[in-house]
Image (spheres, rainbow, N blue to C red):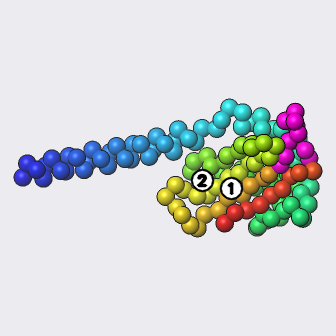
Amino acid sequence: MLTRLIYLIIFIVGITLGASSTYLYFHDNSEQRPDTHELIEKILKYSNIPISADNNACEGKAVKTVGSVVASLLELNKMNKVNMLTYGCFGNSCTVSVSSCQPWQDSECSSRFLKFNVDSSNEIKPNTFSCFDMP
C-alpha cells in the first residue's frame, strides 16, 4: 500500500513538473525579440515592391507585394497560440518566417518564408525579395 502511494506521489509530481515546464517554455519563447519591430518597419518601407513570379512560390491567397507577404506572415502567426515568427540573417541573406509546426509534430505543418538580401551596410536590396512555402 505504501509503495503505491509513493508511486502515485511521484507520478503527480512528474505530471506537475512536465506541465509547468511546457507552459514556461512556450510562454517564455512567445516574447518577441526587441528588434523585431525595427526589422518589420525596415521591411515595410519596401511594402509596395512587387515580388516577381519567378521569386513567388507562396500558395493560397495571392501575395504579390512585400507588404502582402508580411501581412500573410503576421496573419499566419496570429493563428498560433504562441509567437512562431522568426527571423535571422546568414551572410547577406535574411529571412522572416512563420511556422505552424509544434515541437511534437513531424507532419501536417508548414512554414512561409520572406527571403531577401542585404548589402555590406545591412541595407535591404529591394530587387531580392522572394516568398516561398515549405510543406
In the rendered image, residue 38, in percent from the top left (x then y), is placed at: 77, 34
Identify the residue at horizontal 83%, vertical 49% (top origin).
116
**Image check: 11 left or right of 64?**
left
Label drawn at residue 51: none
Q: Amino acid at mark 1?
A: Leu
Q: Can you give x and y, in whole percent of width and height, for residue 128 in the image?
A: 89, 51
Q: Residue at x 68, y 55 (%)?
A: 76
Mark 2: which secondary structure?
A: loop
SS of the residue under disc 1: helix
Mark 2 is surrounded, within 10 Å at the Cα level, by few (under 14), some (14 to 19) or many (20 or more) other residues, namely: some
Q: Pointer 2: what residue?
A: 80
Magenta stretch: includes residue 117: yes
Q: Is residue 82 magenta?
A: no
Left or right: 117, with 109 as reference point: right
Q: Residue at x 48, y 42 (%)?
A: 25
**Magenta-drawn segment:** 116-126
Residue 71: percent from the left, percent from the top? 77, 52
User: Contact (CB < 8 A) between labels 1 and 2?
Assistant: yes
Quadrant where the C terminus is found in the figure = bottom right
Residue type at mark 2: give it: Asn
Image coordinates of residue 37 in percent, x first then y, are 74, 36
Q: Residue furthest left?
A: 1
Q: Which mark is residue 76?
A: 1
Q: Main SS type for the magenta part?
A: loop
Side (left or right) of 67 relative to 12: right
Which quadrant would residue 110 be assigned to in this image? bottom right
Residue 132, compared with residue 42, is above or below; it is below
For marks 1 and 2, give the CA distance.
7 Å
